[in-house]
Image (cartoon, coloured by chain):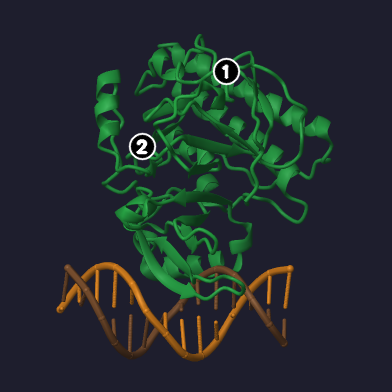
Chain colours: A green, B orange, C brown
DNA sequence: TAAATTTGACCCTA
DNA sequence: TAGGGTCAAATTTA
């Protein structure tokens, strides 16, 4: 069922912390309602879609307050929020879109992923994020030792997918790549995506097949926008990083993110076993809120795990030298399912 | 030979 | 106007 409503503008709200908190709380409340809705066999899909839209809108508003002073982070014409179903238009049509996209590139959603590669394994595998990209340019960047590579989605012409990414090798550490993504994928996930399975055993076996030190973001294979895809786009707003991974360490003191084991985490297609969440350590404490982006890490006792917040899940595999995997989010703390979550180790890149 | 990459030129933004 | 981003022709690769 297609999205029948789109957001035509970003409200110009005050940037006061109260408004920010209000929007976040509102998004939380809608997320709770969605969770309840998903648990009810008789729940309507329409209600779920409506709640998803409300969640996205709330987070967009919040992100606009946090990140933007000059313009919207996600414009109304972004693929994610497009009202029109994707049509198999001509290449010319999409080239025209490209032109418009080029002119508006500054307003597309942007997020960054830091990836550290194992020099012995080469670059291709770890930089494979599950999508198919085509390189369309390379440029020497002022002050950077290595040139920046420009990639666009291979489905750009056929499906009008406007997602692009830039790959910049770190000057200081040549094993580190900063990948900047622009725009959301409106195309199908590439075929090398690790499939989502429904049992714990299968999850573990599938995760074993993920190349080491590679972060794969799982995505529904649906072509048309659906709740999973919408939430994927939402969660891709999170910044994913692996660094100095080392699975040989099992010091629980690294854990700084808490999921309550009682959280009811379930999706239409999969149920996450609670033991998965028990990999997270649980110092539930509150730290003073600071501005900027925060980083939270999970127990490095996981060598291969998935974790999920409702429909937002990530798969992570750590290699012999992996120790932490982190998500970066713009909040130091938030509430979920009636629990407070606090992040420490603020990280800025 | 088609697909993918490279690279110089052009366009846009700050 | 400089620097970054994109285009598109030329070149390379499978």
Q: Position of residue A70 (x, y in %)?
A: 76, 56
What is the chain identity of the residue bearing mark 1? A
Residue shown at the point (51%, 18%) measured from the top left: A35
Helix, strand or loop for disc 2: loop
The residue that disc 1 covers is A33
- In the image, taking residue A327 as reference, residue A128 lies left or right, namely left
The residue that disc 2 covers is A220
Q: Position of residue A20 (x, y in %)?
A: 76, 33
Helix, strand or loop for disc 1: helix
Q: Residues within 10 Å of mark 2 (few under 14, many from 20)?
A: some
Q: Residues within 10 Å of mark 1 (few under 14, many from 20)?
A: some
Residues indicated by labels 1 and 2 sit on the same polypeptide chain: yes
Can you name the residue that lies furthest to the top here? A262
| Residue A317 visible | yes
Residue shown at the point (57%, 18%) measured from the top left: A33
Earlier residue among tags 1 and 2: 1
What is the chain identity of the residue bearing mark 2? A
Q: Quadrant of the N terminus of chain A?
A: top left
| Residue A4 visible | no
What mark, if any, has residue A42 been given in the picture? none
Residue shown at the point (36%, 64%) measured from the top left: A134
- Mark pair 1, 2: CA separation: 22 Å
For this rendering, which residue is in front, A345 or A21?
Answer: A345
Q: Position of residue A143 (x, y in %)?
A: 61, 72
Q: Check the image and report above or below for A100 versus A286.
A: below
Q: Position of residue A181 (x, y in %)?
A: 51, 54
């Amino acid at each position: 069922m297609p999205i029948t409503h789109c957001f035509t503008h970003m409200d110009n709200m005050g940037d006061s912390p109260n408004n920010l908190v209000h929007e976040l709380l509102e998004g939380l409340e809608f997320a709770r309602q969605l969770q309840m809705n998903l648990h009810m066999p008789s729940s309507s899909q329409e209600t779920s879609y409506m709640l998803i839209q409300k969640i996205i809108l709330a987070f967009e508003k919040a992100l606009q307050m946090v990140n933007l002073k000059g313009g919207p982070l996600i414009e109304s014409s972004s693929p994610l929020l497009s009202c029109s179903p994707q049509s198999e238009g001509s290449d010319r049509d999409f080239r025209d879109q490209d032109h418009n996209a080029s002119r508006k590139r500054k307003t597309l959603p942007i997020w960054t992923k830091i990836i550290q590669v194992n020099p012995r394994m080469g670059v291709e595998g770890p930089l494979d994020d599950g999508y198919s990209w085509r390189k369309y340019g390379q440029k020497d960047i002022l002050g950077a030792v290595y040139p920046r590579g420009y990639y666009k989605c291979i489905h750009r012409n056929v499906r009008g997918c406007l997602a692009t990414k830039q790959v910049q090798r770190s000057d200081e550490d040549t094993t580190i790549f900063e990948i900047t993504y622009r725009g959301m994928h409106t195309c199908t996930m590439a075929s090398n995506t690790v499939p989502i399975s429904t049992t714990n055993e299968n999850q573990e076996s599938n995760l074993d097949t993920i190349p080491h030190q590679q972060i794969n973001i799982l995505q529904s294979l649906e072509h048309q926008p659906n709740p999973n895809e919408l939430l994927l786009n939402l969660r891709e707003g999170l910044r994913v990083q692996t660094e100095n991974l080392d699975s040989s360490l099992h010091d629980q003191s690294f854990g700084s993110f808490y999921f309550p084991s009682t959280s009811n985490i379930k999706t239409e297609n999969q149920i996450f076993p609670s033991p998965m969440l028990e990999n997270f350590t649980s110092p539930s404490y509150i730290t003073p809120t600071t501005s900027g982006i925060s980083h939270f890490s999970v127990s490095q006792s996981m060598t291969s795990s998935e974790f999920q917040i409702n429909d937002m899940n990530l798969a992570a595999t750590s290699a012999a030298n992996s120790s932490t995997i982190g998500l970066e989010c713009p909040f130091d703390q938030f509430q979920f399912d009636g629990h407070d979550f606090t992040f420490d180790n603020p990280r800025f890149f």
